[in-house]
Amino acid sequence: MTDYSTDEMMTVAAARRLRDGAVCFVGVGLPSTAANLARRTHAPTLVLVYESGCLGAKPDRLPLSIGDGVLAEHADAVISVPEVFNYWLQPGRVDVGFLGAAQLDRYANINTTVIGGSYDSPKVRLPGAGGAPEIAASCREVVVVLRQSPRSFVDRVDFVTSVGFGDGPGYRERLGLRGAGPRTVITDLGVLEPRDTTCELTLTQVHPGVTVDDVRAATGWELSVAPNVTTTEPPTEHELATLRALEATLNGAP
Amino acid sequence: MAKVVSLADGIAELVRDGDLVALEGFTHLIPFAAAHEIIRQGRRNLTLARMTPDLIYDQLIGMGCASKLIFSWGGNPGVGSLHRFRDAVQNGWPTALEIEEHSHAGMANRYVAGASGLPFAVLRGYTGTDLAKHTETVRQITCPFTGEQLTAVPALQPDVTIVHAQRADHDGNVQLWGITGVQKEAVLAAKRSLITVEELIDELEPVPNQVILPGWAITAVSLVPGGAHPSYTMGYSTRDNDYYQRWDAISRERETFTGWMRENVL
């Protein structure tokens, strides 16, 4: 068996979550890597939408940012940013919103704005919202990918940049949010999904070599665990080779 | 028709202390050269609007040009934080910086309302987020037809908008293409506008889908080849990714930042 890193397992697991033919709104960083891996493996007709206005992007290398020229060169269409949000995201034309996060809580609310202190005087100032609040509200479902630690998985996020399930069942419905919210959270340790009755994130899958206790230790709240936790299939040779070739394009390879 | 002016004259005439200024460009076509001219001319108390402040506003903020920032995502794309922006927000260096924070959808719609001559835009956005609690310019509105609760954001109408584009003719008709972000809306929303271009040519060949800003809709055009560096201009240059990477170390400390600006911009 080939050795692989925990980050590689996370990226492969995230890629597998995207089904062929789906329309996917891609965030910068880990989600972009996973979406491009999916398109090169099991999901060749996955439609990648970037908030810079690239609709149906087919980059032949990993983009360095969401406004990388390679996204425009091979896109089905390049449109303005108001069009992206008003014509494509807002009416619900996007199947999956694929997001990262700095902090996530037990109801899958996302923080990318401030950590600690107050909004006016934060301990750490993060980049902010970008496209995420409306992606989280309007896509049919949301997949979140981030590394798991007690610092990133907190009992309550310091700032709700993008809404998951608020404070529990019925919250999204009361607000009139149209999408189903975060259905899957993929980390370097495993996979969490909201429990239907409580909306609370529940561990349903661990990656090979990871124990439930490892995940508990990396979670800042008392983690809910599904009765039958499965183990992720390790990356195949093909997935790993494709991912590594893709990541090499970031370092100047063609 | 738009005037063709030098960059220095264009900035001197169009950008005034205390103005609301938008320099737009979504990763692509960011008007860095114009920002550097604003820094050299020592503008103060600007309210800077931009969806993604990135390095161009890190430089303006760090050099003390701004007193307020209106934005929706403040980072160095693919690299990390904006250290000068953080220093200004957290420590008031070199001056205090007030912030007005939106989402991308909100900012885009604020420019659309401005370009449309409407007082506000309506969108499905911000619902349930803490942004709505901290930003005065986000309000709930009831649809007069269905009763649905929606969000209103006021028009953003800059005193001056500056963007970079591929080319223009001598009457100031401008073609731009590739990732065009919110540039067209930001220009049409503004009272005055300056477009820096890679090329000035005698006659533009009409090409469908190459967004044209007609000369009568803008104020001035300046020939500034490479004016988007370290950002890029599709068809003319590629993004200087090393610059974005190096910026993290250059901007981290006040001394290295000011030294670098003195050497490379002033």
Image (cartoon, grey):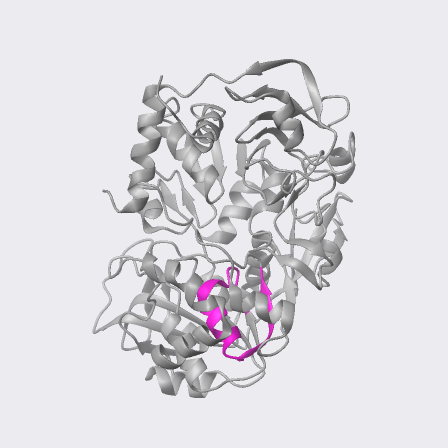
Q: Residue A153: x, y in percent?
A: 65, 38
Where's the N terminus of chain A, which quadrant?
A: top left
Q: Is residue A61 left or right of residue B113?
A: left
Q: Residue A252: x, y in percent?
A: 26, 47
In the image, farthest residue toward the left? B202
In the image, farthest residue toward the top? A228
Q: Identify whether A189 is placed above or below A68.
A: above
Where's the C terminus of chain A, which quadrant?
A: top left
Q: Residue A118: x, y in percent?
A: 74, 59
The residue positioned 43% from the left and 63% from the top of the image is B249
Q: Identify whether B147 is placed above or below A179.
A: below
The residue range painted magenta reads B49-71
Q: Is residue A18 left or right of residue B210?
A: right
Q: Is residue A180 visible?
A: no
> Which is more toward the observer, A215 or A166?
A215
> Which is more toward the observer, B206 or A124?
A124
Q: Is residue B55 magenta?
A: yes
> Which is more toward the observer, A46 or B219?
A46
| Among the 4 quarters of the image, the one containing residue B194 | bottom left
Q: Is residue A31 magenta?
A: no
Q: Is residue B157 left or right of residue B170?
A: right
| Among the 4 quarters of the image, the one containing residue B131 | bottom right
Q: Is residue B88 visible?
A: yes
Q: Residue B31: x, y in percent?
A: 39, 69
